Amino acid sequence: MLTHLAPPLLAAVLALFLLYRGIGYLAWLLPIAALFTTWALGHPEAATTPAFLATAIPFLLLATLFGLPPLRRAVVTPPILRSLSRIFPKMSDTERTALEAGTVWWDAELFSGAPNFARMLAFTPKSLSAREQSFLDNEVKELLTLIDDYDVHQRGDLTPAAWNFIKTKKFMGIIIPETYGGLGFSALANSTIVTRISTHSTTAAVTVMVPNSLGPAELLLHYGTDEQKQKYLPRLAVGDEVPCFALTEPHAGSDAGSMRARGIVCRGTWQGREITGMRLTWDKRYITLSSVATLIGLAFKLTDPDHLLGDTPDLGITCALIPRDTPGLEIGNRHDPMSTPFINGPTRGKDVFVPLDFIIGGPKMAGQGWRMLMECLSAGRSISLPANACGGAQLATRVIGAYATIREQFSLNIGRFEGIEAPIARIAGTTYWMDALRRITAGAVDAGEKPAVISAIAKHWSTEATRRVFADAMDIQGGAAISKGPRNTLANAYQGIPIGITVEGANILTRTMIVFGQGAIRCHPFAFQEMEAARKNDLAAFDAAFFGHVNFIARNGARSFVLALTNGALASVPRGGESGRVLKQLARFSASYALVADGCMGTLGGSLKRKEMITGRLADALAWMYVGTCVVKRFEDDGRPERDRPFFRWATSEALCQVQEALAGVLDNLPNRMTALALRPCVFPLGKPVRPPSDRVCASVARAILDGGAGRLALTPDVTPPSKTTPGLGALENALALTVASQPTREKLRNAVKAGTLERAKELDLVEPALAKKVITPEEAATLRAASAARDDVVQVDSFTPEAYRALRG
């Protein structure tokens, strides 16, 4: 019996091995040929029977048909091309531009099913230069002393001194090269500056962030004429011109392609001369810095009905620069975004005539606006909002690490309760991976990438993570968090969180449409090639892409099954230890992800983009694989510090668990149940092995940021506390230092009570008896009293007289 089973079992193992190695054609050819040969050698009398020949000859024909590309292209490929041409989704020019914008980076490796982790670990992100570090240590630090965030919220703006400092010290020219009078800093420096400011004031961070993100300066740098660059960039760098960019409209938010802002090429009068120009009409809203802007970047759809520029009547989305003093421009009103007082407002114009030279890049760039925006957004979205979100998370970690040490209930600091340890662990672990993602993504931009999908991941998952971090932080602080005033450290940042969720691609849209919708086509090694070949009716290109895709699916099916069956043990990774174990799991999930993604695309076709719950889960899986990679990269680059090991364990467990649940969710809900049933054994042959962070890991993470530990400072390098006399964070840091310093003294008192040396009493009532009996020294008594007073101070909340409260409400 075993003798008869051996050949087919060996053939199956050979097929699986060849598929795992990506040799799809030989994976079916060699095992079947080996079986035929074995049978013929063992039964020579049967080798010429009709039954044997009826089986062997079709096999030889199929091997020839699929093994000879010219024959395959003549017989097999044409009907497949015709069939898939009808299934592939049709793309508008706007969709095509968005899909082709930017570059692919590590997302393509994750989509490959066999990521090259050695490549990522060898990647060396750019470090801060001495000049950039000096700017952080001096100019940024000084700016923070000019900003009292509570005062900013009361006055509804930064102070004139802060505005002047931002302008004169070139905070608005971070990305503008030195040749144009700017700072010319790296993406990492830009990100770190915004992160550091955002730990202090969201309003100030946004004020600095916006001029250095998608807007006039960046568009001019990439697409402006030499004359435009020379005219505007030096003035933008020092704040003589304050920029804004007007894209969003009442009827065109995420769907920018449906904007109603219009421009018509026509003849008109400009400064006393008749010229060919544009007559613009627009109604924009949610435009940051608009109310104070002197130079408005405007996106609109341009038409040329009289063919003054050429034969094309509908030129498409165009970007132009409109000076504030342009006749007909309406600007100055403000919105009130969640009572976070950064400048934000509408702008309108009706039949505003301007020269064609106002187009960024000049008349030749008419109709190129959408491409310009998408390409710049791919880089800019990697920096600004992830940095702002990371600053918020660092603030929450710094505050909660101190507050949970200082605040006591039932004679125990609240950070020691398991119910509090869990949210503390989420806060600290999330902050760790957020900063890893921020740094690695900024490094990619500095390396010349414009990672469209990665930037969307960085924006969405960072801002969503900050929302969860602050929800936990607010829960831990309780009443102290919801009572606003100078003492409150979290409320102002908390109320601004929905803004980051909404802007630069609303998060729901980003997750359900952009990440996988763009990733599936751009990052997949064959999908876009197939679609393009079908669109061009290029048979040879389609043949290579389609059968490459078939081999890709087979390889990933084998890899997914083998790696899942062995819990990733057979994956080849460049590191050992804990990092290696995580990389093996990521390799396993990458193969499973590529397989499941192909299963979804193959069964749903063009309708997949309407199955947004499915695409959202696929986006989750891709994003969390990227997060896991960034965490390993950070841990390895930092030298595997023991201080960070609890954070590493929490973050990697969380990332892997999220990937697993996302893939399971896709399989649970895939409309084609036969496909789901076929995929599940390849993805989860032994069930779902990954578990979320354990209670032990959560406890170790929480302890790492309590009691003034080094872990808390390591997680929050960009938090710059004010003086210890400043209400809020300054007072909290002072109370923490005194509390930690007094802990040995408090322990002496507790031991003396247990030994019967002192009678049981309230802590401060024990001081004098303890001094008398020389249990503690006068210096220790003074520290104990100071710590008690500081703790009592920081748990207080602000209150206002009725008159003062009415004044607060305006």
Image: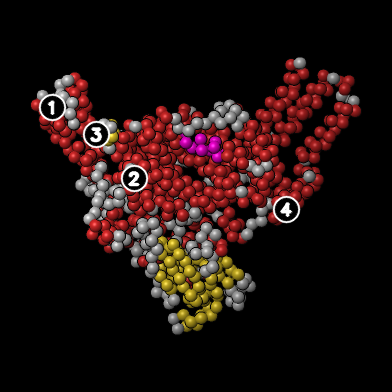
- Mark 2 is surrounded, within 10 Å at the Cα level, by few (under 14), some (14 to 19) or many (20 or more) other residues, namely many
Task: Return the x and y of residue 554 as percentages of the image width and height.
Answer: 67, 36
Q: Residue at x 85, y 19 (%)?
A: 43
Callout 1: few (<14), some (14-19), or many (20+) C-alpha neighbours within 10 Å?
Answer: many
SS assignment for the magenta stretch, majority: helix
- Which residue is pictured at 75% across the width and 22% down the height? 7
Q: Is residue 599 above or below residue 805?
A: above
Q: Check disc 2 and report the residue beneath it.
A: 395
Disc 2 + disc 1, Cβ < 8 Å: no
Q: Quick one: 228 or 388, which is closer to the camera?
A: 388
What residue is disc 3 on?
A: 740
Identity of the residue furthest to the front in this view: 802
Query: Which is closer to the viewer, label 4 or label 1?
Result: 1
CA–CA distance between discs 3 and 1? Answer: 20 Å
Mark 2 and mark 4 residues within 8 Å of each other at the beta carbon: no
Q: For the residue labelled by badge 2, is the local secondary structure a helix, a strand or a loop?
A: helix
Amino acid type, callout 3: Val
Q: Amino acid at mark 2?
A: Leu
User: Which of label 3 and label 4 is nearer to you?
Assistant: 3
Mark 3 closeness class: few <14, some 14–19, many ≥20 residues within 10 Å: some
Secondary structure of the residue carrying tag 1 is helix
Of tags 2 and 1, the one toward the viewer is 1
The reply to whether the C-beta atoms of the residues labelled 3 and 2 are less than 8 Å apart is no
Separation of marks 3 and 4 at Cα, in angstroms: 70 Å
Q: Amino acid at mark 1?
A: Ala
Upstream in sequence: badge 4 or badge 1: 4
